[in-house]
Image: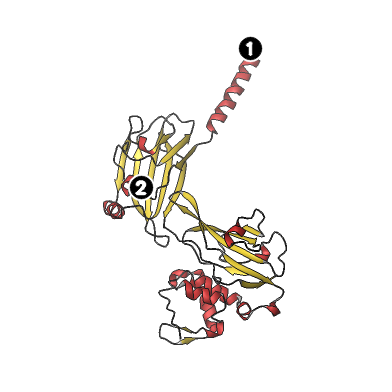
Amino acid sequence: MRRNISFLTVIIVFIASLSLSGQTQNISFEILQDLSSLDPGAFLMANNVSGQPRIFHVTIITNRSRVIIEGRVDWKQSLSSSYKQLLTFKTFPFTPRSFFNDELGSADIRIDQVNGDKDLGTELVTRGKPSGVLGITLRMFDESGVPLDDDFKEIMFLNPTSPSLFLPKDIPFEITVGNAQISWSDVQGALRYIVKACIRGENQSLLEALQSSDPVVDADVGTLLSINLAQYKRRELLEGQRIAVIVSAIVSQSGRETELVSEPRELKIIGSTSSSSSATKNISAEMLRLTTFLSKLNVSNDIIDKISSGQITLEQLQFFDENNQPILMSDFMTILSLLESQPDLVISAIFTAK
């Protein structure tokens, strides 16, 4: 009997040891506040940062008795530039617990090493407020230096503007039931776009119509910059209907998601392509691709509006290379395909009215 008890005890101890060794090792952190108005010096650390503002909270889950935390802050001035290392730090081993950033350097979480790029830090501080993109990485090790887990957050300070719908401002834009194509400007740092369209009743303003609880379209379209509303409709579009439409860009600003909303525009549903206005008939897939691409460059929104609404037609456009030699439309569309996939190749774009 004693032998059976001893054998059972060994099994229980073995199972318990497996459970402990397989326990989840996790470090994560959460941004606590809007950082857009924060002093950039808050991201530059000394050995004791208890006087700094409370920016993030770190949660640790581990079965280790002592852990080491390494942190790294990288900065890039814009989305198109590369990250540069702003600073790194490493703690002495400490008893794991959750903590706030201003507790780093405290009695039980002492800083072992801090290394930073002084010139880069000075450049950030002289800007007066955070700008560009900050990448914060935290890594957790056990006392002997074995990696356990890590977490990364990217915080953008890009001050993006709201998207612009490429539709006329003062008159309804006529679309057919099956070809309700709309496009909008690219927003720097947009995570996704949401399109909402609602039927506009008689004597309703566009904003009043958009407050409807039963929109015709209410769709997350990812990072697309042009869609056919008919592909996202919740119910049929009918001839004669007037539709209010807006596009929202969801961006990450200082660690929080923010919604940037376009000005509303009006669409009018007509029966068929044959009955559409001359402006509507001139809108093609090529024109929509062109307006989407031009929206990413330093080209006036007024020009883009006129192209996308059909006031400027494809036949009225001419394209020239760097030697002022004309480019055939077929050749330009081939070049456009390349530039759409590699926009950094564009040096400059100039629009001249004739």
Position of 350 relative to 157 (above/below): below
Image x and y of residue 132, in percent = 38, 56
* Residue most extreme to the front: 203
Instruction: Pick the residue in front: 85 or 246.
Output: 246
Q: Amino acid at mark 2?
A: Leu
Q: Is residue 177 left or right of residue 137?
A: right
Give the secondary structure at mark 1.
helix
Which of the numbered marks, if any, corresponds to residue 2?
1
> Mark 2: few, some, or many residues within 10 Å (few <14, many ≥20)?
some
- Between the residue at mark 1 and the residue at mark 2, the CA separation in whole angstroms equals 68 Å
What residue is rendered at 65% in x and 57% in y?
Answer: 215
Instruction: Pick the residue in front: 172 or 167.
Output: 172
Residue 221 showing in the rendered view: no
What residue is rendered at 45% in x and 73% in y?
Answer: 300
Position of 208 relative to 20 (above/below): below
Residue that mark 2 sits on:
38
